[in-house]
Image (cartoon, helix red, strand yellow):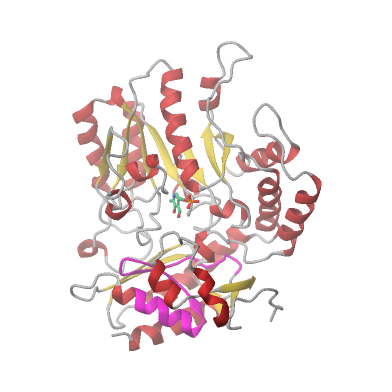
Amino acid sequence: MQELTHPISASTRTDLEAFWMPFTANRQFKANPRIFVSAKDMHYTTDDGRQVLDGTAGLWCVNAGHCRPQIVEAIQKQVATLDYAPAFQMGHPGAFELADRLVKLLPGFDHVFFTNSGSEAVDSAMKIAIAYHRACGQGMRQRFIGRERGYHGVGFGGISVGGIGSNRKFFGSLLTGVDHLPHTHNLEHNAFSRGQPEWGAPLADELERIVALHDASNIAAVIVEPVAGSTGVLIPPKGYLERLRKICDKYGILLIFDEVITGFGRLGASFAAEYFGVMPDLITVAKGITNGTVPMGAVFARQGIYEAFMQGAENAIELFHGYTYSGHPVACAAGLATLDVYQQEGLFQRARDLSEYWENAVHSLKGLPHVIDTRSLGLVAGIELESISGKPTARAFECFLRCYQRGLLIRTTGDIIALSPPLMLEKHHIDQMFGLLADVLRDLP
Ligand SMILES: Cc1ncc(COP(=O)(O)O)c(C=O)c1O
């Protein structure tokens, strides 16, 4: 076990109050905290010295595993060499190199705009979409179409196109001009499907109805997660994404894939776009871009989008948008080292090779108490539990607590367990993960 430099012991836990924790039941947590103090490869270490197997790659982001020396050293070296360089009207080598390396991952995409998070990537992509149409002489195209149960981060753009009631209802009138496609999750037709479910492609045709309502000339873009992660691993029905692409093409609407979770190997390909063979116009990424080490997000633009902006006087700024930390040198160094690790260790291929073993393990939970669906793709899995009557989320949360106590980190959303381990995992980790989960499920009230 690694030595703990500043362990938070039970005696110092009264100091937890000042931190207003995100997406957390603060009072419940602070009454009974769960604290990680270090991590290595597939495991976290808790403040009481226990090892916890990481079934969620942190928060879907540590795709190469924790504290990888190559990435740590690159970050340390960069921060000691060039800690910061202005992002506007100045450059540094790392940002250009990283953008160049990133576009090489996906043929057809040729420019990258850097942000600091997935939320910022989504809002940036939405602004790029509107500004692109304007640059093409179609400034009326300002509306967006998202999807029920979509998660696109927490900016006002993202929650407006997103489809999670509780993320929207406290925050006023949001962006105007947004419609939502129906989500594709349907247990009646698709429970316990292996891979992509058979039923549901015609749900994409709802886009035709929305286009008829507003006219295509007013619509900028459709944004979807190719596989919805945060609302419980919702896998697109066969043919669904292809149909969305076709309808967008028919009406000149941009298609944005939010690949904040599916990017960087999660499905066993660089991106879901490659995995499904469906090319969007813009792709948003974050998380795995730096292996979760330094905050960073990005928007990938397909060929032709950047060029549409490159008109007018050469000394004119083409896109009035950006962040102080766009392309931050330390994030770029982390991104470059992360890509090296992915490539040197063939981690995307590894995810593909392990996905069958993973799928069998996921589906082995069928028949256990409370399990009403199991689904997986690549190295991601959703295990849906029957809710306790009148107490939605309680059963899955109890499962989360028990797994944590027994040494496994899972994530729950509603009554769905979501798993997305680091891609470096071995078969014995999969056995351990599902063995432990099965035991916990058997005992769960
Ligand atoms: C699909 C998707 N988009 C956007 C985001 C937001 O990313 P961030 O939390 O880095 O802002 C997330 C985060 O989980 C996500 O899953």
**How many marks can you see?**
0
Q: Nearer the viewer, residue 272 or 79?
A: 79
The x, y position of residue 421, in whole percent, is 52, 68
The x, y position of residue 146, in whole percent, is 32, 42
Rendered view: 324 above or below 378? above
Instruction: Evaluate whether residue 42 shows in this view.
Output: no
| 105 on left or right of 136 | right
Occupied quadrant, residue 25: bottom left
Q: Nearer the viewer, residue 164 or 4?
A: 4
Region in magenta: 397-424
Quarter of the rendering occupied by the C terminus: bottom left
Rendered view: 430 above or below 79? below
The x, y position of residue 310, in whole percent, is 57, 19
Q: Is residue 420 magenta?
A: yes
Q: Residue at x 47, y 69 (%)?
A: 356
Quarter of the rendering occupied by the N terminus: bottom right
Q: Residue at x 29, y 57 (%)?
A: 198
| 54 on left or right of 28 | right
Q: Nearer the viewer, residue 139 or 272?
A: 139
Occupied quadrant, residue 387: bottom left
The x, y position of residue 412, in whole percent, is 38, 68
| 355 on left or right of 344 | left
Q: Residue at x 70, y 74 (%)?
A: 5
Q: Is residue 206 magenta?
A: no
Q: Residue at x 47, y 30 (%)?
A: 128
Instruction: Evaluate whether residue 296 shows in this view.
Output: yes
